[in-house]
Amino acid sequence: MSEDLIREQEPLARFAKALGHPIRIAIMRMLAQDTCCYHGAMSEKLPIANSTLSQHLKELKEAGLIFQETITLPSIKYCVHKKNWELAKRLFDELYIEISTKQ
């Protein structure tokens, strides 16, 4: 595979990796209900330690799917990064269509 071809796949791979854990899917579903949510509210609903939640939020943030809107320690508000979420949807749709039409 050429370097250019690999580079073209990186955004989709980054999104797929970030969504590759059930807790991260649950976080995105929580954020989809309200668009934004505080760390504390998520920790009350998810069956994981705060430190583990922070790691999952970090993965989603590094992939660009969420961002920190406000940081008023100890509260941190996370929101869906709508532009990147739309990009992820488009890239997944394109892959789905490519695979579906070839079979």
Image (tube, rainbow, N blue to C red):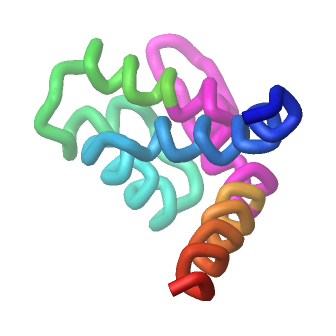
Residue at the left extreme, as displayed: 47
Q: How many marks?
A: 0
**Vertical order, 35 against 46 (above or below):** below
Left or right of residue 39: residue 62 = right
Residue 101 in percent (x, y) is at 61, 87
Which residue shows up at 20% across the image and 38% down it? 44
Part of the protein shown in magenta: 60-86
Q: Does residue 41 appear to the left or right of 35 in the view shown?
A: left
Which of the image's four quarters has the N terminus? top right
Q: Is residue 50 above or below residue 42?
A: above
Query: x and y percent of residue 78 in the render?
Result: 56, 37
Question: Taking 30 as reference, is 71 left or right?
Answer: right
Observer-nearest of 89 and 40: 89
Can you name the residue that lies furthest to the front here? 1
Q: Seen in the image, is 23 located left or right of residue 55?
A: left
Inspect the magenta stretch and tell me whether residue 68 lies in it: yes
Looking at the image, which residue is at 70% across and 71% down?
A: 94
Residue 53: name its quadrant: top left
In this view, the residue in front, 103 or 10, is 103
Q: Residue at x 36, y 51 (%)?
A: 25
Image location (x, y in percent) of residue 20: 37, 43
Give residue 23's position: percent from left, percent from top: 27, 42
Residue depicted at x 80% and y 55%: 83
Please say whether residue 8 is one of the residues in the magenta stretch.
no
| 42 and 84: which is toward the camera | 84
